[in-house]
Amino acid sequence: MTSSTDTIQVSLIKSWDNAEIVFLYKTGGWWKDTYDPAEISRLITGSFAFAVAVDTNGHAIGMGRVISDGVSDAYIQDLVILPVYRGMGIGTRILSVLIKHCKQAGLSWIGLIAEPDSEEFYVPLGFERMPGHIPMIYRGDQ
């Protein structure tokens, strides 16, 4: 690993090595053993945008994606950087690529649900709390 992020490339992708993306999902704590790694390609192509940060060896060290209908709203999710690369601005670069893509598509409402204690990362990038709104998840089948 180099201390400079000049050699880290961030790109929008349409496919990637399934094992590397699964590893990033596991790093984020979002992978369940019941998930099928073969579905990663469908997850990528089904996203409005999927970005990866790539090291000098061509390996994915971070990712993020946008879910959207492409017309009105966009939701950023699954932003994760491998721990050894955190604090180097790579997450900011991924997020910037995703936001730029959304704006170029004419999407002005861009939201996300932040992990606890991560506001200090998102606020300088233009995000703010939505007073009066509560994120919710469906748990009806439990």
Image: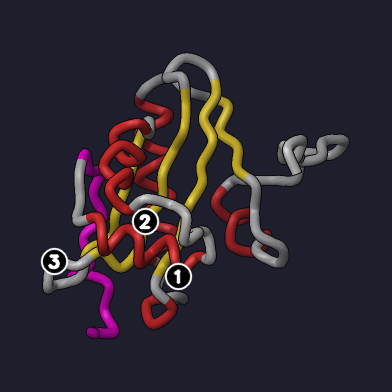
Is 19 situated left or right of 88 in this image? left
Q: CA distance from mark 1 to mark 2?
A: 11 Å
Q: Depth check: give the residue in front, 102 or 75.
A: 75
- Name the residue tied to disc 3: 58
For badge 3, the amino acid type reads Gly
The colour scheme used here is secondary structure
Q: Which residues are magenta?
A: 1-14
For the image shown, how many numbered marks are present on the structure?
3
**Rendering coords of residue 65 (x, y %):** 41, 44
Quadrant of the image occupied by residue 83:
bottom left
Q: CA distance from mark 3 to mark 1?
A: 18 Å
Magenta segment includes 80: no
Crowd around label 3: few <14 · some 14–19 · many ≥20 (10 Å): few
Q: Residue sitting at 71 percent across and 63 percent down?
A: 116
- Name the residue tied to disc 1: 27
Which dot marks residue 63? Answer: 2
Q: Depth check: give the residue in front, 107 or 116.
A: 116
**Rendering coords of residue 41 (x, y %):** 26, 42
Q: Residue sitting at 35 percent across and 45 percent down?
A: 97
Quadrant of the image occupied by residue 112:
top right
Disc 2, SS:
strand
